[in-house]
Image (cartoon, grey):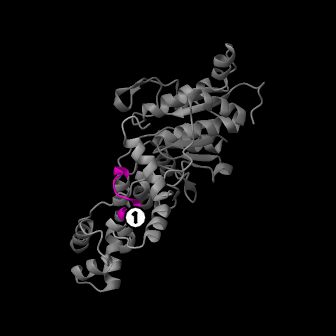
Amino acid sequence: MHAPDQPPLHISLLAAPETSPSVLYGLVDVLGTAGAIYPEITTGKPGRPLFDVNVVAVAATPFRCGLGMMIEPDCALADVASTDCVVVCDMYQPVHEPPHGRYGPEIEWLRRIHADGALLTSVCSGSLILAEAGLLDGREAAGHWCYRELIRRHYPRVRLRDDLVLCLSEEGERIVTAGAVSAWQELAMYLIARFAGREQALQTAKVFLFTEHAEGQLPYAVTVLQPQTADAVIADSQAWIADNLACANPVTCMRERAGLKPRTFARRFRAATGYLPMTYVHALRIEDAKRQLEAATLPVDEVGHAVGYEDPTSFRRLFRRKTGMTPSAYRRKFSRLAAPGGV
């Protein structure tokens, strides 16, 4: 832990035109005032800032990021010879396009600064930059759930934990990754607690009304199953099952419709979609169940039956495994969020 009588620790926030302003400026606000703002609002006398926070980019010249917000970097990468911690801010990336060949200067700098002993952290799609740098090879990492397929296809050595808001399993290797965009809050609290102690983190959380995503990412994750065109037979199966989720024997029906033997159908289905047939069916059913639960109309058991599960216990067990919550808990959380005045 950093001693109070030592100079503030340096935290470098790496930004680019693709950066979300909410992440960048939220981190600037929270980390830049940590240690100072709580004493000010409770005693009237500002405390000592815990961190020296700087926004860094390829060049020090101003540029516009997401939604046209202006960013004025404090310094260029070439001017940062060392730092205690780097946060790779969210850098929006289309869900089917890996950042191959991009962020060359940033990646070179990240590799060097990590080799020199800095803690590397990332928020949301920032983990893609670390993956492109090879810094996540053979390691677990959190990242937004929407990038699960991109990471599986293009960064197979990365063990994505899309259930986690904050991945600390590589903490000993000085790498910490955070999940979706709002997970910057958990990352900020982690950094304050790591470098200044739990009490400072609690004080900051009280100032900003922060609370943790205790249930992780799973309740928020949507399984995006894109129809494919490479295999017309399997594409027909995908279209058919989307309209016949409650079918009692969905895989058999799809296979017979396709006119294929069981093993051949399973092999071609997985090659085309990345999923075994029944896993694909479960994913579609659970997504449909989630939508019905959010609408808060049918009883839970009727929702399960409507999407194809005759056994309520099996439905509840599967739903919890896929979402991290029971159907009833999921309904309470998300039907309230969707209601006027519910948050």
Check disc 1 and report the residue beneath it.
301
Residue 30 shown in magenta: no
| Vertical arrangement, residue 250 with respect to residue 204, above or below | below
Question: In the rendered picture of this protein, how many numbered marks are placed on residues?
Answer: 1
Q: Nearer the viewer, residue 323 or 31?
A: 323
Residue 282 location in percent, x, y? 38, 68
> Which residue is painted at 35% across and 84% down in the image?
263
Majority secondary structure in the magenta region: helix
Quarter holding the N terminus is: top right
| Vertical arrangement, residue 336 with respect to residue 309, above or below | above
Q: Nearer the viewer, residue 238 or 20?
A: 238
Magenta region: 294-303
Residue 299 shown in magenta: yes
Residue 249 location in percent, x, y? 32, 79
Q: Is residue 190 left or right of residue 307?
A: right
Dividing the picture into quadrants, the one containing residue 247 is bottom left
User: Looking at this rendering, what residue extends furthest in the top direction?
Assistant: 44
> Which residue is painted at 34% across and 27% down in the image?
68
Q: Is residue 180 left or right of residue 338?
A: right
> Which residue is painted at 30% across and 81% down in the image?
252
Q: Nearer the viewer, residue 55 or 59?
A: 55
Res. 57 visible in picture: no
| Vertical arrangement, residue 93 with respect to residue 17, above or below | below
SS state under label 1: helix
Quarter holding the C terminus is: top left
Residue 293 location in percent, x, y? 38, 54
Residue 128 location in percent, x, y? 46, 48
Q: Amino acid at mark 1?
A: Asp
Res. 321 visible in picture: yes
